[in-house]
Amino acid sequence: MKIRLFPLFAVLFFACKGTPTEIKQPEYPEKPNIVWIVCEDLSPEHLETYGGTGGKTPFLNALAAESVQYNQVFATAGVCAPSRAALITGAYQTSIGAMHMRTLAPSAAAGDAYPTGFKGYSTVLPEGMKTYPELLRMAGYYTSNNSKEDYQFKSPVTMWDESSPKAHYRNRPDPNQPFFAIFNFTISHESQVWVRANEELLVDPKDVKVPPVYPDDSITRHVLARFITNAMRMDMQVGEVIAQLKEDGLYENTIIFFYSDHGDGMPYYKRELYDRGLRAPLLIKAPFLDGGTQSEELISFVDFAPTLLSLAGIPIPESMQGQAFLGSQKAENPRKYSFAARDRMDSEYDRVRAVSDGRFKYIRNYMPEKPNYQNVQYRLQNPLMVHLLDLNKKGLLDKNQARWFAKSKPDEELYDTKSDPWEFNNLAGNPEYSGKLTELRKAHEDWIAKYGDMGALNEMEMVRNWWGGKDGAPTTEPAQVKFENGKVTLSSATSSASIAYRKSKNVGWKVYVGPFEGNPGDSLYVNAHRIGFEPSEIALILK
């Protein structure tokens, strides 16, 4: 397999100790290969390179030694689907109506529970918005996703060349075609605590670190040991991907991202807007980065998509609200604030917003009459959740642990996450911090004014507005086909529809980017799909 070489100007750098340096890159003559290795529900501290909680993660240690380790990376939600919506679009989930967990039809088998009257839906993306995989495909990339999606909408066939448990960059028909490949590992997901309850532990419960949000007892230690064991097994899976890249002669010149889809998956972590629910690990290895260094640059998940396009030499569309932190389109100024949101979690509604400057965290509770704790049925499968509820009922939790179950919460919260990393001490009423409170409150309000916040709307009314007042999603208008002078031109009357085509049902869909050659008698299959609408598909013979 051909090794993809970067031009000399793309790999030269000058570095100061402990500070990653990246040159201002022009567009690559050849598109770089890019791999995203994604785990689930994992805070940085579980990795040894970020400090560790008792487990061993040697493969990620090795990757970190050749990567920039980012220490201030925050998801836009403390739960997967809204967070993944922001990742795939480069836009805040609250600005596009993708903030509720989750939007697609409920699955009883998965333990999903929804509010009375809920009707499953795909988020209707704003006019002109395209996801980054489609933009990559339009630029000539082979895109593979192995294999979780969970973007709050049904994916159009234009998004991925392949998205399945067998998807792999090795499957591309031309070994010289540049690729973007995702490998998503679910073993660290919260559900695996109970799914793998009877499997062997790789860490002794007595050796794990117990955070102050939990009582230090045998049940807590055993559940944490299970979670840490799962993280260790995820590390081994990362090692397998790295080994494949090396086997194929691609490792040295492939840009690699490793990250989690949000913060930790344990109770009082996941779904919350404290740093423990939002902060994610991020390691990036690239030929033009100074490996073994660390960065304190503030990064939001909405920055991932524009950064990816910047690295691939693809213009960043205006629909993306994040900013590139690497590549030829790197933003002139670093990010000043990160923003996050919590909305409906399965059956339970709440509306919480947060803004951080990397040290101070501001939280606005729009429903302060509700407790932070939500009775999410799915989470009750975790034995630690059941244990905490029992201890709280008996009055056996300390004040910081019991705070989660308080019957209400303040309108505003402010924390110094440097001196108070667990965000126990609310400074909102402290006059010494009134200036910071005012600053971050304004940043929050300016963010809503700039991007909007659809979390303020009634969910089903929002959906009915998308559907034109009807009970179901509109159907994308079928593609119109024009065949003249040996060229096929495709269009759809539905604004913002993506169009795909193929000449046989036995081949993959191609993204339509402009007229293509055809011959009389050719079969043609065309799929038109605006995200959030139902797709339409036609078949015809060219004449």
Image (cartoon, rainbow, N blue to C red):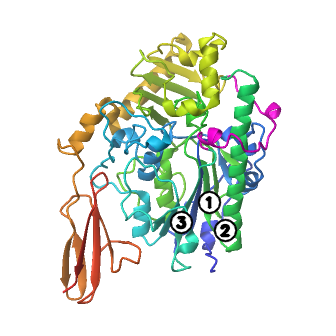
Disc 2 crowd rating (10 Å Cα; few below 14, some 14-19, many 20+) is some
Name the N-terminal-most of marks 1 and 3: 3
Q: Is residue 209 magenta?
A: yes
The Cα atoms of the two marked residues, 1 and 3, are separated by: 17 Å
User: What secondary structure is the magenta-colored segment mainly?
Assistant: loop
The Cα atoms of the two marked residues, 2 and 1, are separated by: 10 Å
As helix, strand or loop, the secondary structure at mark 3 comes to loop
Q: Do labels 3 and 2 touch, CB within 8 Å?
A: no
The Cα atoms of the two marked residues, 3 and 2, are separated by: 15 Å
Please determine whether, in this image, residue 525 is positioned above or below residue 427: below
Identify the magenta region. 189-212
Mark linked to residue 69: none
Query: Amino acid under label 1?
Result: Ile
Mark linked to residue 167: 3
Q: Quadrant of the N terminus?
A: bottom right
Would you name the residue on which mark 1 appears? 256
Residue 280 percent location from the top left of the image: 60, 42
Query: Amino acid under label 3?
Result: Ala
Residue 77 percent location from the top left of the image: 48, 37
Asked which quadrant contains residue 419, the reply is: top right
For this view, does 246 lie left or right of residue 88? right
Q: Do labels 1 and 3 touch, CB within 8 Å?
A: no
Please determine whether, in this image, residue 542 is positioned above or below residue 457: below
Judge depth for marks 1 and 3 and give the one in front. 3
Residue 448 percent location from the top left of the image: 35, 33
Q: Is residue 227 magenta?
A: no
Mark linked to residue 245: 2
